[in-house]
Amino acid sequence: MEEQILIAGGGIGGLAAALACSRAGWPVALLERTHEFGEVGAGIQMGPNVMRRLIAWGLEQELKEVVAFPELLRVRSAAKGEELARLRLGERMRTRYGAPYATIHRADLHTLLHKVVQQRSDVKLVLGQRLESFVDSGSGVQAQTLDGSALEGQALIGADGLWSTVRHRLLQGAEPRVTGHLAYRALIAQRDLPAHLRSQQVTVWLGPNLHVVQYPVRKGHWLNVVAIVHGAVTGEVDDWDNATHAGDLRVAMGKTCDRLQDLISAIHTWRLWVLCDRPPMAGAHEQARGRVALLGDAAHPMRPYMAQGAGMAIEDAACLERLLAVPGLSMAQRLERYAKERWRRNARVQARSIRNGQIFHAQGLVRWGRDQSMRLLGERLLDVPWLYRF
């Protein structure tokens, strides 16, 4: 059996896993079903818990070339435009948690990880190959791709996303569930916006059955905007880059304040993403069995209401790196420890993300209570020490 680790999936989670395994001293063969590496999607907010991992991997200087470092997170009423609460980021995050709070476009993070992984001689990137099946023999894993190619390794890491083939083969569970929420996302150059709509802060607009998040990316030169509304599913739910019409979103915004309406109207091209997730993890058995483990969305897809989907995948990879370097354990024992260390935290973030969605989209008395709590508690309510200190 070859002394290598197989990884299915070449997204952010898969590339982070490849880097982690290589750093732990294991050769890697990564299978990516597309014929060239690329990434689509929205921006990513990276809290100190994520930035610490990336900095520990020696990526601090490269990150500075592509991220933005917002100084403030503001929560505002989508209906009236008034500020409800604010959280200082910037130096406060660095001092309190040992790393900055950053925002980045998903494609930029993917490109950076791809570049770093390419430079490692013990990582082989196999493009145009989709894992179809595998067998855990107890002494290793034999995998077969869709075109019939065979590979073998000491372990298999499924980092193949929400619709994971590895998860399906390993757990034989239900399909991901459709949440009933639709995400409209856009990226626009700040110079193309009217001056009063440009921003270097994170702003979250809360309204009944909707919310909008905006923040700078690409060193602040671009603005990432994501609007999430309740709505019926149209098109394929497994495609997170559907074309859509700007008019649909303007209708969904309803009676929101002028400033938010102006922002939505200033952006003419939107992409639609049907939000799906799974229930919070119920145990370590959902993250690893034998010599096969799951990472990121393959294990714990979550709603984006804590901005931690990519973050939990990177934390998974960092944990995997540490345990793969532990001597004297079998591969199955290493992966068992990995699953035991990760599942509770991942489940907590999944559950909190669901709860945040209910709070963000609240109506009536719950909405009134939310707004009053934010005005009263402010920063104490918005900060998340258990998440950022991990």
Image (tube, grey):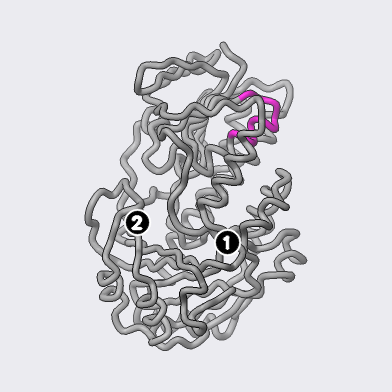
Foreground pick, 112 / 249: 112
Quadrant of res 375: bottom right
Mark 2 packing: few (<14 Cα in 10 Å), some, or many (20+)?
many
Q: Secondary structure at mark 2?
A: strand
> Which secondary structure lies at badge 1?
loop
Name the residue type under label 2. Answer: Trp
Residue range in magenta is 18-27
- On-image quarter of the N terminus: top right
Q: Nearer the viewer, mark 2 or mark 1?
A: 1
Left or right of 222 in this view: 248: left
Callout 2–callout 1 Cβ contact below 8 Å: no
Residue found 29% across the figure and 57% down from its top: 243
Query: Given the image, on which type of amino acid does mark 1 rest?
Result: Arg
CA separation in Å, label 2 and label 1: 22 Å
Q: Which residue is mark 2?
A: 273
Q: Position of residue 242 (x, y in %)?
A: 30, 54
Is 175 rendered above or below residue 74? above
Q: What is the chief secondary structure element of the magenta stretch?
A: helix
- Which one is in front, 108 or 15? 108
Q: Using the image, determine if residue 350 lies above or below residue 144.
A: below
Question: In this rendering, would 276 be left or right of 92?
Answer: left
What's the mark number on residue 139? none
Q: Is residue 359 above or below residue 127?
A: below
Most distant residue in the front direction: 191
Say left or right for 331 vs 231.
Answer: right
Q: Of marks 2 and 1, which one's residue comes earlier in the chain?
A: 1
Q: Which mark is residue 218?
A: 1
